[in-house]
Amino acid sequence: MPGILNVSEAAAIGVHAMMIMVKDPSQPQRVPAMAKSLQVSAAHLQKVLQRLVHAGLVRSSRGPKGGYALARSSRDIRMGEVFAAIEGRPSLTACLLDKERCCMGACVLGDMLHSINEQVTRKLQTRLSDINNNNKEGGVR
């Protein structure tokens, strides 16, 4: 069964592409190599990278030594920025039915949704550099 929280393929590609760039910030990354490493379509990766460029998270350069690289330090880029560049700003609703007032009076899921929204918001504040450091230390919690 899939998880409750779903991340689009484009957002997953964006995050993983950013982490490839974090690992070697001095070397521009080329689309064919990244696509092969991520096992995704080069065309889809290219579209995702263009969104990241438009958001100011990634820069691109042309030519034989060109490719994609972080536009800022990985210490200055948060996960939420990557997701927002791909998906837009998240809507942290308190009602899964998207109603202003719950038909049950007090929302039966309100406390749980509020707690989940807070946790997700905190996780999206994680810096790319912190994710890279956690991966080096044996995994992300």
Image (spheres, rainbow, N blue to C red):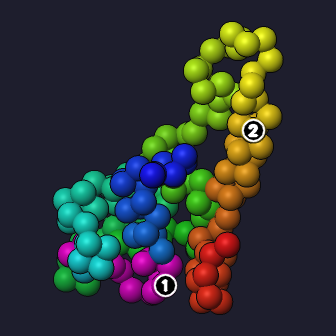
- Identified by mark 2, the residue type is Met
Specify the amino acid type for callout 1: Lys
Give the percent coordinates (x, y) of residue 48: 34, 56
Closest to the observer: 64 or 48?
48
Q: Which residues are magenta?
A: 20-32
Q: Picture coordinates of residue 86 (x, y %)?
A: 43, 49
Q: Few, some or many C-alpha atoms within 10 Å of disc 2 (few <14, some 14-19, many ≥20)?
A: few
Label 2 element class: helix
Give neighbour class at mark 1: few <14, some 14-19, many 20+ (Cα, 10 Å). Answer: few
What residue would you read off at disc 2? 112
Checking the image for residue 23, the label placed there is 1
Q: Is residue 82 left or right of residue 66?
A: right
Residue at image position (75%, 38%) is 112
Magenta stretch contains residue 49: no
Horizontal placement of 30 versus 83: left or right? left
The reply to whether callout 2 and callout 1 are in contact (CB within 8 Å) is: no
The relative height of residue 94 versus residue 137 in the rendered view (above or below) is above
The answer to whether residue 62 is visible is: yes
Quadrant occupied by the C terminus = bottom right
Above or below for 79 versus 61 = above
The quadrant in which residue 135 appears is bottom right
Distance from the alpha carbon under mark 2 to that under mark 1: 36 Å
Query: Residue 61 falls in which quadrant of the image?
Result: bottom left
At a point 42% along the width and 60% down the height, the residue shown is 12
Q: Is residue 27 magenta?
A: yes
Between marks 2 and 1 in the image, the one whose residue lies nearer the viewer? 2
Question: In the displayed image of the protein, which residue is found farthest to the front?
Answer: 1
Q: Counting residues from the N terminus, which is met first, the one under dot 2 or under dot 1?
A: 1
Q: Is residue 107 above or below residue 83?
A: above
Residue for point 56% across, 40% down: 89
Q: Residue at x 20, y 63 (%)?
A: 41
Say which of 24 and 114 sits in front. Answer: 114
